[in-house]
Amino acid sequence: MSAEVIALIVLVLVFLIATVRSINMGALALVAAFVVGTAVFGVKVTDVLGGFPANLFVILVGVTYLFALAKNNGTVDWIVHRAVIAVRGRVALMPWVMFVVCAAITAIGAASPAAVAIVAPVAMGFAARYRINPVMMGLMVVQGATGGSFSPIGIFGAITNGVVDKSHLPGNPAVLFFSAMGACALISLIGFLTLGGAKLLRRDRESPKVPAMAPAGVGVGVGGSAGDSEPEPAGDDLPRLDAQRSLTLVGLAVLAVGALVFDLDIGFLALAVAVVLTLIFPSAARGTVDKISWGTVLLVGGIVTYVSLLEDQGTVKWLGDGVAHVGTPLLAAFLICLIGAVVSAFASTTGILGALIPLAVPFLQTGQVGAVGLVTALAISASVVDCSPFSTNGALVVANADADERDNVFKRLMTWGMTIMVVAPVLCWAILVVPGSLS
């Protein structure tokens, strides 16, 4: 049995054992990475640790630490109430507002994790306050960021179009962008309807609307019937800006501008803002370190370390090469889309887009499979799975969920991610690849 096959079997066992037994999957994956790396691949421990996602670690710790401070001092409550007023009390609109905001941010060139890191804490806070399904809110935040990333100046769009040009393949940036955005919007719509969106719409119709310039009042809650919905604080009870909250808002603005405009590392920037706020207002920092989602950090760090080991040792390339030699181009196209989805659910979407498209070049040059259709199908398959809790975006959603809901959000996002991982390649292949091969 080859080392690649053993490593893949161990990965499956990690998931099975962590599902059956009450053990952190990340801790189990770290042990598996050590055993497989040293005993199967024969690499040093330092090489195994080289795959630990230090950047993701800093992002998760920095962002959750900063927003724990913002929750403690009431800044998040202030933002949430202003958002309710902005949508005139129509709570059902907020998931779509978050979708559009994330899409707009990434469409102009921001990295998807940066957009999610900034928007997700507020979105998840809003979901907790107004009893919106946190899985639905997180799913729509991630899908909005993913769809916008495929604009011609977005990160995913630029990478995909660049690889296509470098590989001397025909491309169509408009088809790529609108197809990806359509796929993300469709997934969001399905999530909205199946995770409580219809109930929110009904609640908005039955409950009194909040005037545009008035404080959020009674009837905005979304649990139970309109008559027993949770009343909102009115007038003087609304969170007000004080020196601490104002400075926190300034810090969040610095985070957004630094990450989105100047491309600064969002993890270190969030930590820097949090440290400054802690030095100025030490009383508000009590207990915030405990609110960092350490369990999520361990889980994601362990899984990504193991998958990075597989990438470094050529297991992913081994899979891709095996697919490239499949005799039937149409079948090979489907398998490449499936591999892209599976690997991207646990690793870097950016890396997958850059690695798998060149693997498809040999059979694309035969003319039996349309290049534009396959590239678009592969790009969508490898990106819409970013809601997986093992990806950066999914991990940010889990980390910013309420502590009581975190395990449930993780499990539900994993279910959604694994479902999309299978369904997306099938549909993309059937809609975008098969018609081109038959024409």
Image: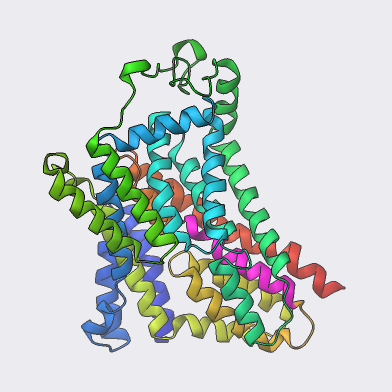
Q: Quadrant of residue 18?
A: bottom left
**Left or right relative to 154: residue 236:** left
Task: Assign the magenta stretch its main secondary structure.
Answer: helix
Whether residue 143 appears in this view of the structure is: no
Q: Position of residue 379 (x, y in %)?
A: 61, 68
Which residue is painted at 34% across and 32% down in the image?
77
Which residue is painted at 29% across and 60% down in the image?
269
Q: Position of residue 292 (x, y in %)?
A: 24, 50
Q: What is the quadrant of the C terminus in the image?
A: bottom right
Write the start and end of the magenta stretch as one range: 371-387
Q: Position of residue 105 (x, y in %)?
A: 52, 55
**Left or right relative to 272: residue 342:** right
Which color scheme does this rendered protein use? rainbow
Q: Is residue 285 magenta?
A: no
**Left or right relative to 222: residue 302:** left
Q: Nearer the viewer, residue 195 or 319?
A: 195
Which residue is painted at 64% across and 82% down in the image?
360
Residue 354 higher or lower than 187, as above or below:
below
Residue 130 higher or lower than 395, as above or below:
above
Residue 13 higher or lower than 201, as above or below:
below
Q: Nearer the viewer, residue 218 or 23?
A: 218
Q: Quadrant of residue 310?
A: bottom left
Q: Is residue 380 magenta?
A: yes
Q: Position of residue 226 (x, y in %)?
A: 51, 14
Which residue is painted at 79% across and 82% down in the image?
368
